[in-house]
Amino acid sequence: PDDEPALHVESLDVTYGRALSALRSVSLTVPHGGVVALLGANGAGKTTLLRAVSGTLRLHRGAVTAGRVRYGDTVLDGRDPVAAVRAGVVQVPEGRRVFAGLTVDENLRAGGLGLSRRAPAQVRRARDRVFALFPRLAERTHQAAGLLSGGEQQMLAIGRALMAAPRLLLLDEPSLGLAPQMVHRIGEVIREINTQGTAVLLVEQNAGMALSLADHAYVLEVGEVGLSGPAAELARTDAVRRLYLGET
Ligand code: ATP
């Protein structure tokens, strides 16, 4: 058994329906304990890549038509979300998707359900970790999630994912629509989660934030990897500065 697994996406092709090719020959690695950023314009295929890793592709009528997704020894392409969660891979979907009618506490408990027959003590420990990261959630355990602010809902979405004790966290645009101060806070939290030993694959429109957190970055261009390299190096390239960091 591989106790320090890495994510390997190898020459992956994904299509939606019969005709729409969303990813072509995409290869990417997230090392154990690393932070990797995935950048690209709208529609480049970032969300599709996360879906292919987290087993949610089929829920969106997509399919892997070639290539492989492995996490350590576990093959993940063509599997379902339960298989991914069991392997230690959990996605936080874009747009947060918390259960608005459930309380904060109920949302967190739902996140722990993927792991069957977990001891109550383990669930409590996971919850304590979430509350340590997000004290604001601890103050609002009985509040309906739909009444939280956008930033608080993002915290809850991340917290819910952490309840499954992932070794690799897939984050889809966590900063989307949040005020600058909250974006900063989310960045700090991602760093903290990584310091605690969880690897992160981070999809972001906010390239500045993503490149400051990541060790390594990939840029998707209409379904293919355009650029990739150490995050600090990419941040210095002309194309990335112009297209993704808004410099002229
Ligand atoms: P965004 O930043 O807008 O979320 P993205 O880089 O995440 O963009 P994807 O959402 O992965 O891009 O989309 C890649 C391509 O696949 C786009 O052409 C998109 O229209 C298409 N696509 C995404 N989901 C589906 C679906 N469920 N059915 C059909 N086509 C889809």
Image: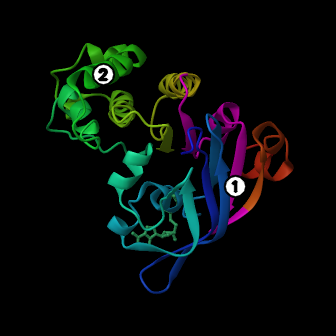
* Mark seen at residue 39: none
Residue 191 lies in the magenta stretch: no
Whether the residue carrying mark 1 lies under 8 Å from ligand 1 is answered with: no
Residue on which the image places disc 1? 219
What quarter of the picture does the N terminus occupy? Answer: top right
**Residue closer to the observer: 143 or 167:** 167
Q: Is residue 44 left or right of residue 141?
A: right
What's the residue at 64%, 36% (across, down)? 34
For the residue marked with disc 2, what is the amino acid? Arg
For the residue marked with disc 1, what is the amino acid? Val
The single residue placed furthest to the front in the displayed view is: 1
Q: How is the image coloured?
A: rainbow
Q: Is residue 56 left or right of residue 202?
A: left
Q: Which residues are magenta?
A: 196-225
Q: Secondary structure at mark 2?
A: helix
x and y percent of residue 219 in the render?
69, 55
- Up/down of 123 relative to 34, above or below: above
Q: Count neighbours of disc 2 (C-alpha within 10 A) and say few if under 14, some if 14 to 19, many if 20 or more.
A: many
Q: Place residue 161 in its image quadrant.
A: top left
From mark 2 to mark 1, how far is it between C-alphas? 35 Å
x and y percent of residue 235 in the render?
79, 41
What's the residue at 36%, 42% (across, down)? 96
Residue on which the image places disc 2? 127
The single residue placed furthest to the bottom in the displayed view is: 18
- Up/down of 13 relative to 150, above or below: below
